[in-house]
Image (cartoon, helix red, strand yellow):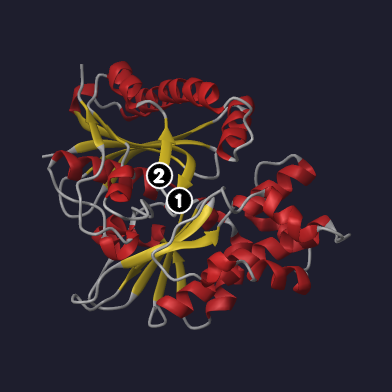
Amino acid sequence: MSEYYLGLMSGTSLDGIDAAIVDLHGDYPSICAALTQPFEPALRQALLTLAQGQASDEIEVMGSLDSRLGTCFAEAALQVIADSGLPRETIRAIGSHGQTIRHRPAAAYPFTLQIGDPNIIAERTGITTVADFRRRDIAAGGQGAPLVPAFHAHCFRTPVENRAVLNIGGMANLSILPAASDSPVSGFDTGPGNVLLDAWIHAQQGQSFDSNGAWAASGKPIPSLLERLLAEPYLAASPPKSTGRELFQLDWLMLHLQGSNAAAEDVQATLCAYTARTIAMALRTWAPATQRLLVCGGGARNRHLLALLGTELGGITVESTSAHGLEPEWIEATAFAWMARETLAARTSNLPDVTGARHRVILGGIYPAG
């Protein structure tokens, strides 16, 4: 018997909403339909301004964008249902991550905030919606991120080899999956994934991303700049840890570029090398026994970045999650569909060894269908 759930995800890259309908009957998820609904440029810019703390009237802007995004999420859900041909009533629930606009797990009063009003999603779709997944983990003393390692372990852990899953979105995060059943799953944000690459090419060329890393591949890394970027204290911090645009954004990069007249393509090459190096450093430090690295997220399509990563990691096999039955761009939307099911079944889905929470908790708030 099929068991359909719908996942909605909008990540740090701010390129749009990923929506996926997933059949969770059986041991392995099966994606029935998926789409990406791009953000209109004006909406993306408004979200970027808010997320980077540059909005002049944050509460008004946040409230408006919360409502607007709720509508966008609902529309994406309805569209993927229409594309699937499935009756709406067969979708058990929607799991919506929302759009992160601020993430401060180390503040005196820790918090994380995602917008995209789930009340609107439930009302517009008529489907029970689970959302606000991160704050219960924060309440339990955790980082609230990353949350997907539990799903990665469900899908990709095996007793025959030590694996890690690398999600390259705006930020890059690792899920470390030891073969030994008595070793805990762990994970953390390694640092920037696509966020600096996207910001720099947008500032220089007006493009939203560097397709296949072609522009980065046309330049040469600048050793002195790479060394300055690698001195960022976040990289040396021990897990559990998570980060976001609060740290890694264009203003951070410009501080390191002061007084530089480097060619723009060489800066892009340096940023690509920086993403690859920081991921490799994290894996060698915290999971040196890894034999296979499975890559997902938008960065999995960046051939130049993956080539650099393969060089950095030497004898570790680096491959897309598509080799294991799940296309890389739909992993996170699928994960939040799975988390919605876990929440409705009153099962925990955070991992204290990942987030640093005091104990396991049931994540998310439930917004019932009308």
**Residue 322 location, x and y as percent?**
40, 57
Quadrant of the image containing the N terminus: top left
Secondary structure, mark 1, is loop
Mark 2 packing: few (<14 Cα in 10 Å), some, or many (20+)? some
Residue drawn at x 48%, y 83% is 315
Residue 2 seen in render: no
Depth check: give the residue in front, 319 or 66. Answer: 66
Disc 2 marks which residue?
A: 111
Q: How many marks?
A: 2
Q: Quadrant of residue 312?
A: bottom right
Depth check: give the residue in front, 325 or 279. Answer: 279
What amino acid is found at the position of numbered circle 1 in the picture?
Ala
Mark 1 packing: few (<14 Cα in 10 Å), some, or many (20+)? few
Residue drawn at x 86%, y 61% is 260
**Residue 271 location, x and y as percent?**
68, 61
Residue 350: mark in rendering: none
Indicate whether 255 appears above or below 204. below
Secondary structure, mark 2, is strand
Q: Quadrant of residue 133?
A: top left
Residue 107: mark in rendering: 1
